[in-house]
Image: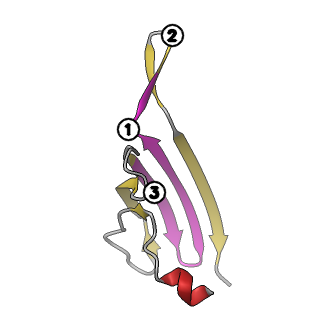
Amino acid sequence: MVVELCRFAPPYASAVKLFNPKAFNIPLRAGLMKNLAEKDSKPAFTFGTGLNLLYMHLDVSGVVSSERTRIDDSEFPTKVGLAGSFGLLF
């Protein structure tokens, strides 16, 4: 069953991180995400940053859709997301 699922391509595309030293790292990421399985879907812009210091990892990332909606004569993104994580390696 797992082998059969691996044959299908994932329906999303995204960007990757460019620079990654081991002891101290401040990753900055930006990218574009689109649902490839749905032809009418609009792309979304992704961004993120973090702090990696030896065994500690702190990360914040977000996504904003390019599609807009109008509320009371103002335009806002249809979808907005924010995520954060903290981790320790031991």
In the rendered view, would you say 56 is above or below 79?
A: below
Q: Mark 2 and mark 3 in contact? Answer it, CB < 8 Å.
A: no
Q: Is residue 79 above or below residue 89?
A: above
Which residue type carries mark 1? Ser
Colour treatment of the image: secondary structure
Q: Earlier in the sequence, mark 1 or mark 3?
A: 3
Task: Mark 2 vs mark 3: give the one in front.
Answer: 2
Quarter of the rendering containing residue 81? top right
- Say whether disc 2 or disc 3 marks the residue closer to the N-terminus: 3
Q: Can you give x and y, in whole percent of width and height, for residue 54 in the image?
A: 54, 78
Against 23, is 67 above or below? above
Q: Amino acid at mark 3?
A: Thr
Of mark 2 and mark 1, the one earlier in the sequence is: 1
Q: What residue is shown at x 50% (from left), y 83% (from top)? A: 6
Q: Mark 1: which secondary structure? A: loop
**Prevailing secondary structure class for the magenta stretch in the rendered image:** strand
User: How would you rate the neighbour count of disc 2 (Cα within 10 Å): few for under 14, some for 14-19, many for 20 or more?
Assistant: few
Residue name at image x 36 percent, y 68 percent: 17
